[in-house]
Amino acid sequence: MSRTARRLQFLNTVKGDLCLPNKAQIAHEILAYLSDHPDAEDTLEGIVQWWLLERKIKYQRDLVKEAISELIKNQLIVVNKRARDTIVYRLNRDNNSDGMKFSPR
């Protein structure tokens, strides 16, 4: 399988996992935020812009970290260390293995 085909396979897998939250999930996120910040109060707009966004970012960061680990494990991306212990990731241009498949599950 070519590198481009592997990327498309990965993107199709990820795309299938993306979904919009339902009312129960949103209610859970609001209560989780209030559990973390018991004195919080805000308007509807504030809840949407700040509370839910903060929860989503926290959740997405964990998912991104897991996805990066999978991509490294499958040699699709590589790790480079920069100054001050900064870690950056990039496409693995040296990987020409056509037999490698990505399966995040």
Image: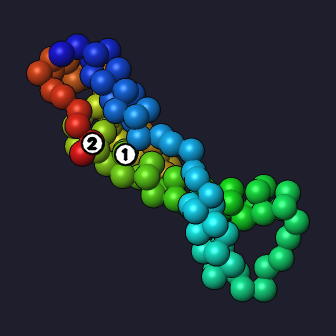
Nearest the viewer among 82 and 47 is: 47
- Residue 85 seen by the camera: no
- Furthest residue in direction front, as rendered: 23
Q: Quadrant of residue 37?
A: bottom right
- Residue 56 drawn at (x, y percent): 60, 56
Circles 2 and 1, Cβ within 8 Å, touching? The answer is: yes
Residue 12 vs residue 84: left or right?
Answer: left
Q: Which of the two labelled residues, at mark 2 and mark 1, occupies the earlier sequence position?
A: 1
Q: At 23% across and 33% down in the image, what residue appears?
A: 102
Above or below, 75 relative to 61: above
- Residue 25 drawn at (x, y percent): 56, 61
Q: What residue type is labelled 2?
A: Pro
Numbered badge on residue 104: 2
Q: At 41% across and 41% down in the image, what residue appears?
A: 17
Label 1 environment density (alpha carbons within 10 Å; few <14, some 14–19, many ≥20): some
Quadrant where the image shows the C terminus: top left
- Residue 6 drawn at (x, y percent): 27, 22
Nearest the viewer among 44 and 59 is: 44
- Residue 37 seen by the camera: yes
Q: In which quarter of the image is residue 75?
A: top left
Residue 72 vs residue 18: left or right?
Answer: left
Q: What residue type is labelled 1?
A: Ala
Q: At 64% across and 80% down in the image, what residue appears?
A: 36
Nearest the viewer among 87 and 8 is: 8
The nearer-to-camera label among 2 and 1 is 2
Q: In which quarter of the image is residue 68?
A: top left
